[in-house]
Image (spheres, rainbow, N blue to C red):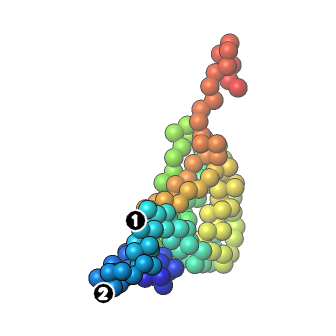
Amino acid sequence: GMIALNNGDVQLARESFTTVLRIQPGHGNARYQLLRLKNNGPRYAALVRQKKLTKIMIPAVDFDAVTLPEAVEGLDILITKESKEGFSPNFVIQDPNKLFADRPVTIKLGNVPANVVLEYIMRMANASVRYDEHAIVIRPLGGGAAKKPAAGGATE
């Protein structure tokens, strides 16, 4: 169970700890680990998603003045290809105020992990990334909230 958990296989870890408890109902560590999985399962899955990106090497990236959505779509294709379609990052872009339209991304990198490419894209687009259980969520830094008009109608 611990090996599975350390490898990011939350489902196998859960099954392993449950099996241990069927064999040894008083096994304290198995009971503790199942409780941790129950309380933190989505967080573990998010960490697994993040860790997988560090293991996928991207041989070449060449984006020239593309939008953030285009860069993310390109990275998605590269990740899927290099993982031999074994991993899909599931990017979700939250940009209700269309802030990413005016933030061009230009990157030329070779032989780097996918997480490094994503970090460079985030910096260039002034964006943040959050790893969730089933997706990687991208938002403008500061949440992308629209500026509120100040007194007199001018924006802050």
Q: Position of residue 93 (x, y in %)?
A: 51, 51
Q: In the shown orientation, is residue 139 left or right of residue 36? A: right
Residue drawn 63% across the image and 51% down it: 127
Residue drawn 39% across the image and 81% down it: 27
- Residue 15 visible? The answer is no
Q: Considering only vertical position in the picture, is 107 above or below 4?
A: above
The quarter of the image holding the C terminus is top right
Residue drawn 51% across the image and 46% down it: 94
Q: Secondary structure at mark 1?
A: helix
Between disc 2 and disc 1, whose residue precedes? 2
122 or 16: nearer the viewer? 16
Q: What's the residue type where badge 2 is placed?
A: Ile
Q: In the shown orientation, is residue 125 left or right of residue 37? A: right
Q: Which residue carries the number 1 mark?
A: 38
Q: Which residue carries the number 2 mark?
A: 23
Q: Position of residue 147 (x, y in %)?
A: 63, 29
For the view shown, which residue lies furthest in the front direction? 26
Q: Which mark is residue 73?
A: none
Crowd class of label 2 (few under 14; some 14 to 19; many from 20; radius 10 Å): few
In which image quadrant can residue 130 be found? bottom right
The quarter of the image holding the N terminus is bottom left
Q: In the shown orientation, is residue 51 left or right of residue 31? A: right
